[in-house]
Image: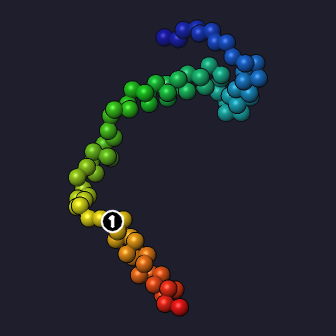
Amino acid sequence: MDSKLTLKLNQSVIEKAKQYARAHNTSLSRLIENYLMAVTKNAENTDEISPLVKSLTGVVQLDDKDYKKDYIDFLNQKYSYWTAF
C-alpha cells in the first residue's frame, strides 16, 4: 500500500535528484523508496553473518607465531646484500 510523504529539501538537491531520476528512467518517489529500503535493510542485518562467512568459519587455523618478527627477519635477509657494501 502506497502512502504520501511530505519532505522539506533544498531546492537544488531536488532539481539534481529529478535530473538523476530522469536519466535513470525512474521517478523521484521510486528513487527515494529504493534508497530508504536499502538503508533500512542494511540496518536490520548488521548483526547477521552472511552464509559465505559462516561457511569459512574455522577454515584457517592460526597459531601463536610472531608474524611481525618473521617479516622483519625476511626483510633483513632480503636486503642484507645492500648492507654488505
Name the residue beneath numbered marker 1: 67
Above or below 47: residue 33 = above
Number of numbered discs visible in the structure rendering: 1
Three-letter amino acid code at the position of disc 1: Tyr
Give whichever of 9, 1 is nearer the camera.
Answer: 9
Q: Indicate whether 58 appears above or below 14.
A: below
Q: Quadrant of residue 77?
A: bottom left
Left or right, residue 42 beside residue 13? left
Vertical order, 32 against 78 (above or below): above
- Residue at (34, 32) in percent of width and height: 47
Image-based side of 44 in relation to 4, left or right:
left
Residue 45 on image: x %, y %: 38, 31
Describe residue 74's horizontal placement relative to residue 4 as left or right: left
Residue 50, image x, y percentages:
33, 40
| Horizontal arrangement in the rendering, residue 61 relative to residue 2 (left or right) | left
Residue 26 position in % (x across, y down): 65, 27
x%, y% of residue 14?
Answer: 72, 21
Q: Nearer the viewer, residue 19 or 10?
A: 10
Q: Is residue 62 visible?
A: yes
Q: Residue at x 53, y 91 (%)?
A: 85
View extreme (bottom): residue: 85
